[in-house]
Image: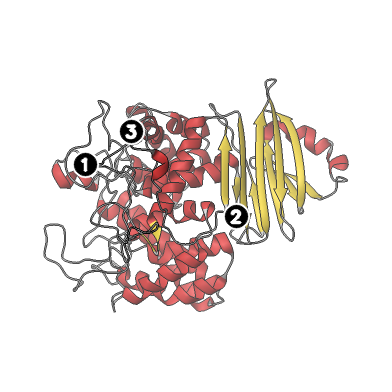
Amino acid sequence: MKGEENEVFEPHFTFQGFRYVQLKNFGGDVLLDDFTGVVMHSSLERTGNFECSEPLINQLHHNILWGQKGNFLDVPTDCPQRDERMGWTGDAQVFVRTASHLMNTAPFFTKWLRDLKADQTPEGGVPFYIPNLKESYSIESNWGETHHSSAAWGDAAVICPWTIYEMYGDKRLLAQQYESMKKWIAYIYDQGDNPYLWNTGFHYGDWLALDSDKEGWDAYFGATDRHYVATAFYAYSTSLVQKAAATLGYAEDADYFQTLYDGIVQAYRNEYVTSDGSLSVPTQTAHVLALHFGLVEGSVKESAIQKLKDLLAEADDHLKTGFVGTPYLNPVLSATGNNELAYRLLFHTDYPSWLYQVTKGATTVWEHWDGIKEDGSFKDGGMVSFNHYAYGSIGEWLYRFVVGIGPDEGKPGFKHIHFKPMPGPGISYVKASLETMYGTAACNWNLTDNGTMELHITIPPNTTGEAILPAAKLEGLLESGGLALKAEGITGIEACEDGVKVALGSGSYIFSYAL
């Protein structure tokens, strides 16, 4: 250094995620104000804000946000602090919806999905990470023979563009990625002898699930049959490509993918639903996927819901899911009438749980549920990251179910907004907002001491919304419908499956009712 003035030295073409700085042979007093941590991430506008009555949940939300900041630097990396820092596709697709609540991710994923399309194999396979860093797509290993095309990882080619479309309502990304989406489905279709089942090749399965009875690296794949996971995602991605085709006006393609989807679902049911109407794969994740992807119906669906509850009860109402099952677990519970059970999972503070990490002082989301053990020691072995956002996918549930604010698939980009708050034990108030393409949408609710629910809703200009109020108030609301319909902005009140649906124009509204 010149020694004449303050000088700044920073590394170029690299970054390093960290929480602590270690000083060695440092002379003089150590003053915190003498040190500045430089936060680096892609320029992403903050869009989502969440606050509730429980400080531990607020810290969890903070951790999810900072996990996103630490990993969204040009590409959605798996972790920023060790020798990977790569754009793992599976991590990106399970987190994309949560990420799009917290920040404006449309430009970020538009760029990354172009990279994915460029790195896709000629047959339509998708590398495990984008950009692909391997000289060859092939590898000889105990796990498989390719560096590409695991179910749930390669499905980022479909799930990410559809999610961005649903969150922002811009067809251009769908149009840009449509051929890539089709190629991914075509790749799966060409695997094995049965075009309606994906029962070949290497897959990561329910990565890092806690239900495996194996040891070492083999335990990381979880207990859910990997071909079950592959076929479930095959069906799900095919359904999304069908929707994309319909959205883009490709009627012939839409018909083709609908027929293909129907064939996959039937093959799935033939393969994995037993004669007594239960699933042949007895894991939490298997049942979560079946329910979230709509692969079962009628009595089989009811049986799957009950079995999922039984499996959770066997684990003392704790999750055993990994990267594949965890993002959908709480949404499935809330959507199937088990909202209190979803809250119970959220509020656990012992291992394994989201708040266990918080009670151990986490400031980001961990890769393993027990990165730090009960006794304060670190998890044994390699691959222990304390900034790995996959399990931060619980953030979507906080916004869509706890807050109750969500987009409409038919009018994407929050052109039409669904408000369906689902209070549960442990939270007395929630304040949340989302910056949409049309302005600020907000939903705040408060449970008073006398058992009254007070709900505040804000709908931005040039949009519409609907609020779902509990069935307990059905009779009274419909009887007073004449008066309510005269309130400015309310365009209709009607009964629905979950109670009463109130149609709303842009503006601010307050509803108060007893739960």
Q: Inspect the image, locate mark 2, and give the three-letter code of the amino acid beneath it.
A: Pro
Residue on which the image places disc 2: 407
Label 3's element?
loop
Q: Is residue 320 above or below residue 125?
A: above
Residue on which the image places disc 3: 352
Q: Is residue 165 visible?
A: yes
Q: Are marks 3 and 1 in contact (CB under 8 Å)?
A: no
Q: Inspect the image, locate mark 3, and give the three-letter code of the amino acid beneath it.
A: Pro
Q: Nearer the viewer, residue 215 or 10?
A: 10
The CA span between labels 1 and 2 is: 55 Å
Where residue 307 appears, x then y in whole percent? 38, 36
Q: Inspect the image, locate mark 1, and give the three-letter code of the amino acid beneath it.
A: Asn
Instruction: Using a 10 Å C-alpha cutoff, classify the residue at mark 3 as few (fewer than 14 neighbours), some (14 to 19) or many (20 or more).
Output: some
Which of the two discs, 2 and 3, labels the residue nearer the N terminus? 3
The CA span between labels 2 and 3 is: 31 Å
Q: Is residue 258 visible?
A: no
Question: Which quadrant of the figure has residue 121?
Answer: bottom left
Residue depicted at x 57% and y 69%: 170
Residue on which the image places disc 1: 25
